[in-house]
Amino acid sequence: ETGVTQTPRHLVMGMTNKKSLKCEQHLGHNAMYWYKQSAKKPLELMFVYNFKEQTENNSVPSRFSPECPNSSHLFLHLHTLQPEDSALYLCASSAPGTENTEAFFGQGTRLTVV
Amino acid sequence: AQTVTQSQPEMSVQEAETVTLSCTYDTSESDYYLFWYKQPPSRQMILVIRQEAYKQQNATENRFSVNFQKAAKSFSLKISDSQLGDAAMYFCAYRSAWDGGSQGNLIFGKGTKLSVKP
């Protein structure tokens, strides 16, 4: 248990559905991240939030919409996804600017778009 | 832009033996952090070991140690006395020490799948 919790663990959705992924951390970290992990590809950074402000959007299509209402919670809203969006979505948190340099990850949401 | 390369898609080791996983990276920065993460079938990414670039001494964590060669931009992971529970995907990752730019996000290699034979 790393202190970062993601729900749901698995999600199957149709291309016309709207769903949301949730990430929660109570580690006191101020930065939260969404990563996409596809087969045979490096983990791809999608979004970065620092103190609730989005500081990086790594050219992610608009069908992915992040939301960070506070430093402990991060959402990824999904709509009109494509089958190629099927992947493991990982949330992470960290405390940049401190001595604690590592990121802590959740267990991920396995997303399947049908 | 920084890149991380893991040239071994798969590795295998006999239980109780030693294995070394390779990682090279490219950066123009002088201050950064390097990490090895383990991802077992449960999918949880777990930190194995970290290295600060300004430290010459190689990091060690129980059976895990690194060989950090800054000039060569190499960061290999050595697992001693391999155990069945070490079987997992291992990812090498880079993080800039300049938080104003990267905000602490990690750049990952493609990973190495480690199998441990009983």
Image (spheres, coloured by chain):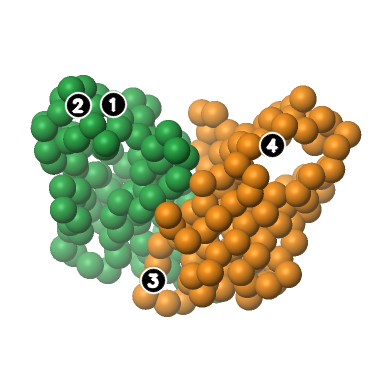
Q: Position of residue B39 (x, y in %)?
A: 40, 41
Q: Mark 3 vs mark 4: tell me if same chain.
A: yes
**Which chain identifier belongs to the green chain?**
B
Q: Residues within 10 Å of mark 2 (few under 14, many from 20)?
A: many
**Which chain identifier belongs to the orange chain?**
A
Q: Position of residue B51 (x, y in %)?
A: 28, 60
Asked which secondary structure carries label 1, the reply is: strand
Asked which secondary structure carries label 4, the reply is: strand
Mark identifier at residue B115 = 1
Circle 3: residue type: Asn
* Side of A51 where A69 appears, left or right: right
Q: Chain of mark 1?
A: B
Q: Are marks 2 and 1 in contact (CB under 8 Å)?
A: yes
Rendered residue at 35%/39% (across/down): B90
Rendered residue at 27%/69% (across/down): B54
Which callout, 4 or 2, points to the residue nearer the camera? 4
Rendered residue at 15%/47% (across/down): B63
Q: Are marks 3 and 4 in contact (CB under 8 Å)?
A: no
Q: CA distance from mark 2 to mark 1?
A: 6 Å
Circle 4: residue type: Leu
Q: Which residue is mark 3?
A: A100
Q: CA distance from mark 4 to mark 2?
A: 35 Å
Q: Chain of mark 3?
A: A
Q: Which residue is mark 4?
A: A11
Q: Which residue is mark 2?
A: B13
Q: Are marks 1 and 4 in contact (CB under 8 Å)?
A: no
Mark identifier at residue B101 = none
Sequence-first tag of 3 and 4: 4
Q: Residue A75 appears in which quarter of the rendering?
A: bottom right
Classify A94 as above or below B92.
Answer: below
Q: Residues within 10 Å of mark 3 (few under 14, many from 20)?
A: few
Which callout, 1 or 4, points to the residue nearer the camera? 4
